[in-house]
Amino acid sequence: MVSGQTKYKLLRTKYLLPLSDRLGRKTRIGDGFIFIKGEYIKEVGEYNEQRIDDLLNKYGSEIEIIGSHSHNIGTDKVPQINGVALPGFVKGHGHDHESPIIGIAKDVPLTTWLDSAVNLYTGFLHSEENSLTKHFGRSPYLITYLKARIDDLQHGITTALVHHCNFNKYHVDELIEANQMAGTKIMIAVGSQDRHYDSRILDKPATVAVERLDELYEKYKDTPNIKIIPGPDQFFSNGPELLKALKEWAREHNTLIHIHSSEEPATTKWFLEEYGMTPIEYGHSIDFLDEKTFVGHQVHCTENDLQILAQTKTKIVHNPLANTILGSGMPPLQEFKKRGIEFIISTDGSGSADNQNIINAARVATQFQKATHQDATLMTAQDVLERITTLPAQILGFNTGSIKPGKLADIIVVDLRVPNLTPTRVDNVVENLIWAANGNEIQYVIANGHLIINDYQFVKLNVQDILRQIQELSEIFLEYKSRTKAEKATGVREKA
Ligand SMILES: [Zn+2]
């Protein structure tokens, strides 16, 4: 039988973390099993010989036993994988177009990095698209997005919000193609901007951005594993009329709206000078903030900002890797907690992060809080684990993020045979995941009931091919970069 194609799957692991309310979010099962039917989880629990025999007798060769070809301990009918099974990670904020620009424009602040890495790279794809497509035999956008899907899966991320900014807003089709090829789930926050940005991509009149959303929404509303929402790049680059129109669209379609906010001090300063308000006060003044508004970063908060965020129930996604690397600062997470402002943890794009190691992001988030507040009790391993699984799944509205019957079968297995995760026991398995794992010990990935990574091998994607093309694409980009001046296309401009 072809791997990953069977109707039923059975998985037995040394430890199982269901992260489900039904069993208790903190439940840790020793010797657990998961039975999958089609796309969904059918049964979860402690391994029980009698029950497993019943399943094997009933479904026989229709069941694929995960890990049966691997070197695992035990000689049972269903071998126990020496690993811990948990829900596939859910990433609340990232940019798939940044996958090839790791290590570029480092040691510079956000706006310089945007201009000389992100905008230069996307400008490169835009102006060289035809010759690159001819050269590679497929769209350079598709290659870029496929690499991003690999980056996610390598780190156990099976569901992601992709904030598709700048030129990428014209390339949603390629992103959806990459997602279907990879077998993941994505929410696409389709970008827009109508001011203070590269003149080639300004949405003028503002109705252009709404029409783009309408078109994409109609086209993909029945496509599985895809959700389309508005994703204006940031408050700075989207004028009030455009923001109001997009929020109205989100309310009409009952979707989230996603935006970068208050990431670094310069834009906040610009808002104060221009409007006499912070970005959050500005968003509030145009009725943009409510429980379906999901903002990226929100590093710099005034007392009034915090009150508005709590009152409007605005949700936040914290990106500690990007915030520290770019020297942006870190958001006041303890204030968020105190005031009941919901937040999750994510990686941001590979260009700023410079990877999609979401376990590392969770670790940096808690480490920073403990050190800053000189309080080791803050943000436990369990707490941050929920902020990369169950909580983001709830915010994004995907039927995933925990392992229980009726949920989509999005499951990862972290390999416990590696030295850095030895010894792992039931009492330290969650703590080891956050504090001792490197974040790339993801031995198996199942998404939507399909086996995507089998004993570290990608089943669906031709990874070597994609990596080779990405390497070459980055070398062609280097040559382009050497002869192209970075246009100051974003960030804070001097007032005329
Ligand atoms: Zn971002």
Image (tube, rainbow, N blue to C red):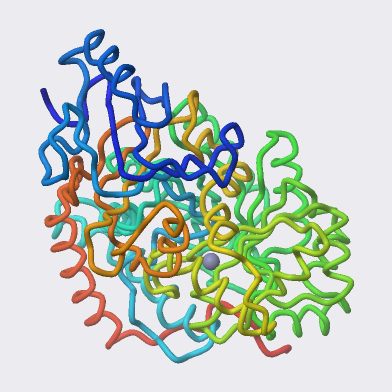
Residue at horizontal 61 percent and vertical 42 percent from the top? 394
| Among the 4 quarters of the image, the one containing residue 352 | bottom left
Q: How far across and down, in percent of the image, does residue 476 sit?
A: 20, 74
The percent position of residue 139, horizontal first and vertical second, equals: 25, 53
Name the quarter where the C terminus is drawn.
bottom right
Q: Residue at x 31, y 53 (%)?
A: 414
Nearer to us in this view, 59 or 47: 47
Compare residues 7 and 216 and report the one nearer the observer. 7
Left of 20 or right of it: where is 113?
left
Q: State the residue lying farthest toward the top.
A: 58
List x then y, in percent, for residue 444.
Answer: 26, 45
Please give left or right for residue 229 compared with residue 45 in the image: right
Give 366 or 396, whichever is nearer the viewer: 366
- Examine the rendered structure and indicate whether residue 83 appears above or below residue 384: above
Q: Residue at x 69, y 82 (%)?
A: 373
Q: Does 420 appear above or below 71?
A: below
The answer to whether residue 123 is left or right of residue 270 is left
Q: Residue at x 83, y 62 (%)?
A: 339
Measured as percent of width and height from the top left, residue 190 is found at: 54, 51
The count of marks equals 0
Q: Quadrant of residue 53?
A: top left
| Above or below, 143 relative to 399 | below
Could you tell me which quadrant the N terminus lies in?
Answer: top left
